[in-house]
Image (spheres, rainbow, N blue to C red):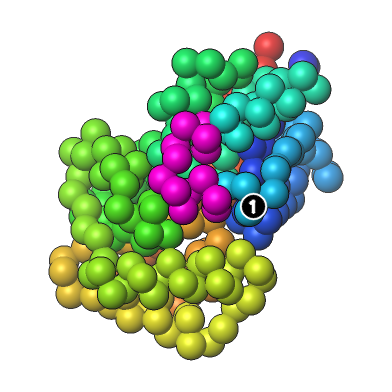
């Protein structure tokens, strides 16, 4: 049987990319029914500061160029398709796709498909302020006929602070866990039946084990979608 497709990871922040990479590698054996097996994986990431500079000045064309640079580097070393374990910069993906050397999986579409599969109807969205204020998740969720809710402005600011000042540096504070739990509780009161963990670092501190709603772990869902594509579509 032919080898699985080669997965290219267009990375942005380290913790989320590492979790995605680790999930592909550790869960690959079960998909391939072979100990220690997983598809070939390559990753490229520029400095996170380069992305943040673009985000701070709302320059999505520059974000797209960074993503395309990674895409071309990964295509040059044999990646068959690409994933990006960063929800925020998916806002630039429409500018990337027409010039991309390889096809992409879209993280929000993967999450929305899983929400529909599990029968959820109204989703709370968490993530950086750039992500939560964008149409990345609303568009994917509405395309599946589902509803969505955003956190309050104050909660958006606090979530963003936790992500950018703590989680991307690998800091996991108990007070921040409590803040996320409070936001999820608010979504539950607003009749949401699940919450999107729409930053790839969020699953490092919150999940089904400590949240009052079922969680949609964007990082692991993207990794599993990549495994499925790499294995199911091989020649």
Disc 1 crowd rating (10 Å Cα; few below 14, some 14-19, many 20+) is few
Locate residue 197: give its quadrant.
bottom left
Q: Is residue 90 left or right of residue 115?
A: right
On the image, the x and y values in percent for residue 193 come to: 25, 62
Residue at left offset 46%, top offset 72%: 161
The correct choice, above or below, for 149 with respect to 176 in the image is: above
- Between residue 12 and residue 190, name the one nearer to us: 12
Q: Check if residue 223 falls in the magenta segment.
A: no
Q: Check if residue 58 falls in the magenta segment.
A: yes
On the image, the x and y values in percent for residue 152 come to: 23, 70
Residue at left offset 48%, top offset 21%: 97
Q: Quadrant of the C terminus?
A: top right
Q: Is residue 88 left or right of residue 227?
A: left
What residue range appears in magenta? Answer: 52-64
Query: Is residue 94 visible in this depiction of the protein?
Result: yes
The correct choice, above or below, for 5 with respect to 193 in the image is: above
Q: Which residue in the protein does label 1 denote? A: 48
The correct choice, above or below, for 203 with respect to 108 in the image is: below
- Between residue 209 and residue 138, name the one nearer to us: 138
> How many numbered tags mark residues here?
1
Residue at left offset 53%, top offset 66%: 164
On the image, the x and y values in percent for residue 75 come to: 71, 21
Residue found at the far bottom of this picture: 175
The correct choice, above or below, for 95 with respect to 116 in the image is: above
Residue found at the far front of this picture: 57
Query: Is residue 78 visible in this depiction of the protein?
Result: no
On the image, the x and y values in percent for residue 201 come to: 56, 61
Q: Quadrant of the N terminus?
A: top right
What SS does tag 1 mark?
Answer: helix
């Amino acid at each position: 049987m032919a080898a699985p497709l080669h997965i290219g990871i267009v990375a942005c922040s380290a913790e989320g990319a590492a979790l995605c990479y680790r999930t592909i590698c550790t869960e690959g054996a079960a998909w391939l029914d072979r100990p220690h097996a997983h598809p070939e994986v390559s990753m490229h990431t520029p400095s996170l500061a380069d992305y943040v500079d673009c985000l701070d000045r709302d320059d999505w064309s520059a974000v797209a160029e960074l993503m395309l640079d990674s895409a071309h580097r990964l295509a040059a070393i044999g990646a068959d398709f690409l994933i990006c374990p960063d929800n925020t910069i998916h806002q630039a993906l429409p500018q990337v796709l027409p010039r991309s050397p390889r096809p992409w999986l879209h993280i929000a579409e993967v999450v929305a498909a899983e929400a529909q599969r599990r029968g959820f109807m109204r989703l709370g969205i968490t993530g950086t302020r750039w992500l939560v204020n964008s149409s990345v998740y609303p568009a994917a969720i509405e395309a599946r006929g589902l509803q969505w809710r955003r956190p309050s402005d104050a909660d958006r600011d606090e979530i963003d602070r936790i992500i950018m000042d703590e989680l991307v540096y690998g800091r996991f504070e108990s007070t921040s866990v409590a803040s996320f739990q409070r936001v999820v509780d608010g979504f539950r009161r607003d009749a949401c039946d699940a919450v999107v963990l729409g930053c790839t670092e969020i699953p490092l501190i919150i999940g089904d084990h400590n949240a009052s709603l079922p969680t949609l772990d964007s990082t692991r869902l993207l990794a599993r979608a990549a495994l499925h594509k790499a294995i199911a579509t091989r020649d």
